[in-house]
Image (cartoon, rainbow, N blue to C red):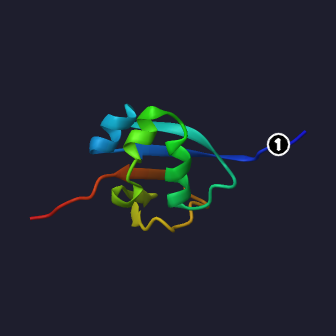
Amino acid sequence: MWSISMSELKLVYFAWVRERVGLSEERVSVPDSVLTVAELAGWLQTRGEEYAYAFENPAIVRAAINRKHVKPDASIAGASEIAFFPPMTGG
């Protein structure tokens, strides 16, 4: 019998990402084959309509690992919290 190893992460969603997903945060078990922020966003898209909608254009969704902004190719290894949010503007 095949077994897929999973890692548990806390995911936090902000602004319209939160509105589309319908949650402000959650704990998820992520397959060990998901190694980067981009792969995590792609995996999340498969979890239902609301996730597909939130991550329909993953290039514009920003991420932070353990409260540090990261690029989509950043490794999620060792992460305890990953936040997703829309681009921010300053003034």
Image quadrant holding the N terminus, namely top right
User: Seen in the image, is 2 located left or right of residue 63?
Assistant: right
Query: What's the residue at 57%, 39% (across, down)?
Result: 28
- Residue 61 in sight in this render: yes
| SS label for mark 1 | loop
Query: What's the residue at 41%, 59% (across, down)?
Result: 64
Vertically, is 54 above or below 84? above
Horizontal and vertical percent position of residue 8? 62, 44
Horizontal and vertical percent position of residue 91? 8, 65
Give the mark count: 1
Query: What's the residue at 56%, 62% (across, down)?
Result: 36
User: Seen in the image, is 2 located left or right of residue 89?
Assistant: right
The amino acid at mark 1 is Ser
User: Seen in the image, is 78 located left or right of residue 85?
Assistant: right
Query: What's the residue at 46%, 64% (across, down)?
Result: 72
- Foreground residue, 72 or 82? 72
Which quadrant holds residue 54?
A: top left
User: Seen in the image, is 67 located left or right of residue 90?
Assistant: right
**Residue picked out by circle 1:** 3
As drawn, the residue found furthest toward the right would be 1
- Residue 80 in sight in this render: no
- Foreground residue, 44 or 5? 44
As drawn, the residue found furthest toward the left would be 91
- Foreground residue, 59 or 80? 59
Within 10 Å of disc 1 (Cα), the crowding (few <14, some 14-19, many 20+) is few
Horizontal and vertical percent position of residue 19? 31, 35
